[in-house]
Amino acid sequence: MQTIDKFNFAGHKAFVRVDFNVPLNENFIITDDTRIRAALPTLKKIIADGGSIILGSHLGRPEGVTDKFSLRHILPHVSELLGVEVQFADDCVGKQAKAKAAALKPGEALLLENLRFYAEEEGKPRGLAKDASDEEKNAAKKAIKASQKDFTSTLASLADVYVNDAFGTAHRAHASTALIADYFDTDHKMFGYLMEKEVQAVEKIVNDFERPFTAIMGGAKVSDKIEVIKNLLDKVDNLILSGGMIYTFSKAQGGKIGTSRYEADKLDLALELIQQAREKGVNLVLAVDVKIADSFSNDANLSFADADNIPDGWMGLDIGPKTEAIYTEIIKNSKTVLWNGPTGVFEFSNFTHGSVVTGEAMVEASKHGAYTLVGGGDSVACVNQFGLADGISYVSTGGGALLEAIEGKVLPGIKAIRGY
């Protein structure tokens, strides 16, 4: 398999699939440029070699062309960070994209418009009526697959090298993340530096971990993490379940959870997971106390309660101090720690404390030689926001991709490059 370090990009045009799906405020100002900065080593290597870059990315989940999701908004900042005036094409497979890509000179860069403006990128038909018949649905799927092939071949024709540096989309078999690789031979397709690091981090967590191995799974719903939890039960020594899902587990065991949100149809599953952990000898850790509020608001009245005895009219929105102490002790005594998902309603400042304490414990564990990995939007935002990221062994840019890899799935974006 080709590697970016060994490849000399001099005289080559590289299509680089990046993940520039960054958050923008109402004035289209980037509020967190982590993903752009993460791609810079790859992009600067190509330019330093004397190659040129064609950048492809998505932004948001558009259902067609819309200014709200135009990559034009991030162009000035990408140029500033890269140190090169990046050109822009207002399409990604049209005449302008082809012309500008063909005219690129060594050391130059071109940013294509949002790949997801085209339904062919994801390979899913759009605009189908809700009452469309199965025949109509099948015809639409067949049509989009046919046009996706043309879309993919056009993207590939813009360059003679393909570099995938977008781990955040590696779990998607989209045109630019997986299918395009078929148009390049093994010597002319490779991972970027970021993708290489992500793959290595995942493999360390999945196959090369040291014990004690602790995983912290947060999130609102048990249903979002079922397969991950099941897979982790075969690997970890300690599984800490946190976030909103803890109220489903508490309710399943007969606890009083007030007005806390839970999944009524997952109560039996929660009990099954508790039993599986017991049978496998895994220390399944649930909150013993929680920070509660009398409404779902940052300005609500606050108090603390046992996790299984929340008063009527109150809801749990973060873990409490006793639980923080338990988490901290387990994490500090671990050699491998994986964290995905905050401990509470992280968007409310009054309910970030548990997540911050968890991040601080991971930093301490790292100082004592543990391998710590943080992945998933809100937990990554936490360690970045509170200046903890530098103390973590690795902070992943992937949310869904990381989870699917931990589930044991083969990610299309990875398989497309290395063949497995």
Image (cartoon, rainbow, N blue to C red):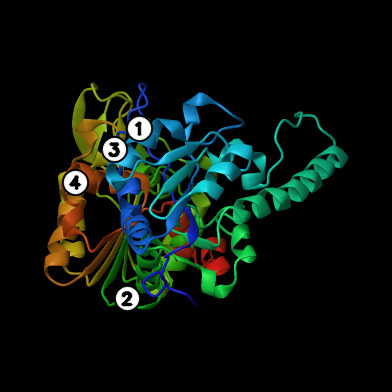
**Labels 2 & 3 near each other (Cβ < 8 A):** no
Closer mark to the observer between disc 1 and disc 2? 2
SS state under label 2: loop
Residue 402 locus on image (x, y percent) = 43, 58
Q: Is residue 233 above or below residue 80?
A: below
Residue at mark 1: 258
Q: Residue 209 has which mark?
A: 2
At 46% across and 63% down in the image, what residue appears? 11
Query: Between marks 1 and 3, how big is the CA–CA gap?
Result: 20 Å
Residue at mark 3: 346
Query: Between marks 4 and 2, how big is the CA–CA gap?
Result: 24 Å
Q: Amino acid at mark 3?
A: Phe
Q: Which comes before the other along the chain, label 4 or label 2? A: 2
Q: Amino acid at mark 4?
A: Val
* Residue 343 in view of the camera: no
Query: Between marks 4 and 1, how big is the CA–CA gap?
Result: 25 Å
